[in-house]
Each structure stands twice: as structure tokens, then as C-alpha cells.
Amino acid sequence: MKEDYVVAILGATGAVGSRLMSELAYSEIPVKILKLLASKRSAGKKIKYQDQVIEVEEARPESFEGVDLVLSSAGGDVSKRLLPEAVKRGAVCVDNTSAFRMDPTVPLIVPGVNDEELVHHKGIIANPNCSTIQMVAALNPIYQKYGLKQIIVSTYQAVSGAGQSAWNEMLDEAKEYLENKPMKAEILPTKGDLHHYPLAFNLLPQIDVFEDDGYTHEEWKMIHETKKILLNDMNAPDLKVTATCVRVPVAVGHGESVYFTVNDSKATVDEIRSLMAQTKGLVIEDDPKEQIYPQPLNAEGKRETFIGRIRADIENPRAFQMWVVADNLMRGAASNTVEIAASLVKRNLI
Ligand SMILES: NC(=O)c1ccc[n+]([C@@H]2O[C@H](COP(=O)([O-])OP(=O)(O)OC[C@H]3O[C@@H](n4cnc5c(N)ncnc54)[C@H](OP(=O)(O)O)[C@@H]3O)[C@@H](O)[C@H]2O)c1
């Protein structure tokens, strides 16, 4: 195992990038040099990391010369353009974007669920979509013990999932609404689409662009990423998954209502609750009598996935329902990425 690593954070000035820095500092990864990379706009900006002040550089292919590990979160197009350059120069990249997730040669990893796939990496490892990570983390112990037949998920996704600029837009809209002014929307539901709508005091049942079949690309990602992570096949026919993804005016923390059907008829709510309670990274907050259940405000800044409202379907003895909440920027992005990197270091795979 190497004793220290040259690490680059690509997209260091973004909503996920700033958390990648704090998660890297929290991790046990020995960092010799940290490079902070972003667009030309941020070049020269100074950012504090532990006791150093680091100048942000414009990301270029040659920025990766001598770099061992890249933590990448600057959007899919940037990853597609720059990560192959980083790999060519000998770096191993953990990518937060959707650029390589469906590439069959790229492992798609949720630590604690499928770390064993890391050994197959060829220089790039993909971090799943934020909404997929928290759902799969919660369902994996159930899948391992009882098998899963079907998952039906509805998401309530925070605005920070669309990046810092969308978050700022929602805060401006909230001020405009409270001052009785028209709300200006130029980014959400998704950059570059035909129409934009305000999110403040509203709900948008569109995350990412629409596919021809009427699903959004975010829904498509939840379906196929879940199959790839749990069954190693993005089109696995044995597990049926469907999703409805909704953007809600919450700053940080995605909520998900997850309905699932198990194969084993002996599963009970108590067993499921106790299985999840014994799983590292899952926290049960489930006491209806005391009105205890997970909430985004309480999950903000945390690395864990919070689960509550676990109950059996009254009409189907093999079906259950639960409410899952996690910080999308931490569990859904930065913590997952840095845990993948730490696992690579521990397994001597860099
Ligand atoms: N937010 C989430 O919950 C979440 C979760 C999982 C995955 N992701 C994914 O992570 C990526 C980043 O998300 P985010 O929320 O952090 O977005 P963000 O706040 O908009 O930040 C984007 C980052 O990318 C950099 N960047 C943009 N264009 C670039 C270029 N041409 N070359 C180099 N760097 C460039 C930006 O630098 P400048 O500051 O210089 O523009 C900034 O550092 C996206 O692909 C997103 O889908 C986000």
C-alpha cells in the first residue's frame, strides 16, 4: 500500500466538491498533495483545506500529471472529456456524474453493498445517483435475506441535488414570492430544457429530461442503477423497479417513499427493522406513537441513511413500505465517493 497520495478534486468549487474536501479530510486516506480543479471561471480562487490555502486551477488534461486519485464532480461532459485523460496519466478516478455509470466495464459502487466489484476497475469507478444510493443502502440487507421481487419508489428530492446555481435560484424565488413579486425561473426543472418553472412553494415532477417512454432520465437512472448494483445487470428482468422522481422545495436531504415486495413469505416488519438496525450506515427512526420519523432537516450534514415508517402492506403479506431520508450531498455524493476511494486505498487498488 502506498503511504501517501496525490489527490485531485475535479469540481472543487461546487455543492458536492466542497463536501468532497471535508470528507477527504475526515477520511483515513493519506494525502500528500491536494489539487483543486474547476472551470476557468474559478482559476486563482483560494480555498482553505485543513491548515493550507490551495489555489484552484483550471482543469486541463495536463492537470492530472502525477495524480494518483481523482474525485470527480464537475458534470457528465467534463468527466467524459477529462477522466480518460487522467486514467491515461495513471490516475484512478471516482466519478460522481452519470457519464460512465452504465458502462459495463465501470463498477457502480455503494460501499457496504457491492465493494467486491472494485477489483474489476479499469481506472474509473462510478458513484451512483444520489437517490439510488440511499434506496439501495436501505434495501440491501432485505435483498440479501429475503430476496426482492419489486420496488416502487416515489422520491422527494432537495434542490441542492441540481447544484449550487439551482439552490440559489430557489432562495431568490422564495424572497420574490414573499415580497409579492413574480418569481424568475431560468434553471429548474433542468438546465437546457424548453420550459423553466419556479420551485419555491411548488413541486416539480420532473428531474432531468424526459425519455420517449414518458419516464424522466432520473427515474430511468434509479431503475437501471438499482439493477446494476444489486444484480450486476442494468436490465436484470427478475427485479421489477419503477420510480417517480419529484423535486421539492427542500434545501438538502432527499426523502423517498419505498414500496417493496420480497420473495420470502416469512419476512416480518420486526425482522426487517432489526436487520436494518444491525446494518452499518443505517439509522432507524421509527416510533409512530412518539411521532419519530426521518426528516431532511435532521439528516443534513450526516453520512448515514435514516429509515422510518416501516410497515406491512395491509393487503399483500409480501409487501412493505418505508420512508428513507439521507443528505444527498453527503450520503448521496461526497461520503459515498470518499468511502469508495478509502476502500480502494485499503484494498491496494490504486
Ligand atoms: N448535488 C447532488 O446532490 C449530487 C449528487 C450526486 C451527484 N451529483 C453530480 O455531481 C456533479 C456536480 O454537482 P454539483 O451539485 O456539485 O454541481 P455544482 O454546484 O453546479 O458544481 C459544479 C462544479 O463543476 C465545475 N465545472 C463546471 N464546468 C466545468 C468545466 N468545464 N471544467 C472544470 N470544472 C467545471 C464547477 O466549477 P466553477 O465553479 O468554476 O463553475 C463546479 O466546481 C453533477 O454531475 C451532478 O449530477 C450531484
Image: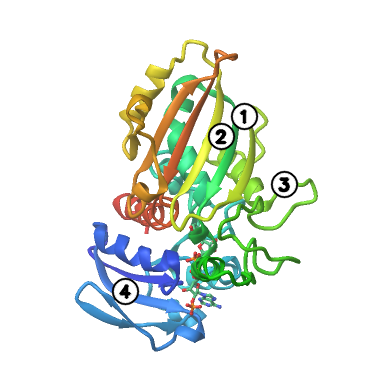
Q: Earlier in the sequence, mark 2 or mark 4?
A: 4
Q: Amino acid under label 2?
A: Leu
The answer to whether the residues at label 2 and label 4 have Cβ atoms under 8 Å apart is: no
Q: Is ligand 1 within 8 Å of the beta carbon of the residue shown at mark 1?
A: no
Q: Name the residue under label 2.
A: 231
* Residue at figure coordinates x 56%, y 60% from the top left: 200
Q: Amino acid under label 3?
A: Tyr
**Does residue 107 show up?**
no
For marks 3 and 4, give the CA distance.
40 Å
Q: Is ligand 1 within 8 Å of the beta carbon of the residue shown at mark 3?
A: no
Q: Mark 3 points at which residue?
A: 215
In the image, 126 versus 150, the foreground residue is: 150
Q: Amino acid under label 1?
A: Leu
220 vs 268: above or below: below
Q: 10 Å neighbourhood of mark 3: few (<14), some, or many (≥20)?
A: some
Residue 315 image position (x, y, % from top left): 59, 14
Secondary structure, mark 2, is helix
In the image, 154 versus 264, the foreground residue is: 154
Q: Mark 4 points at which residue?
A: 34
Q: Which of marks 1 and 2 is nearer the N terminus?
A: 2
Q: Which mark is residue 239?
A: 1
In the image, 43 versus 273, the foreground residue is: 273
Q: 10 Å neighbourhood of mark 2: few (<14), some, or many (≥20)?
A: some
The answer to whether the residues at label 4 and label 1 have Cβ atoms under 8 Å apart is: no
In the image, 12 versus 207, the foreground residue is: 207
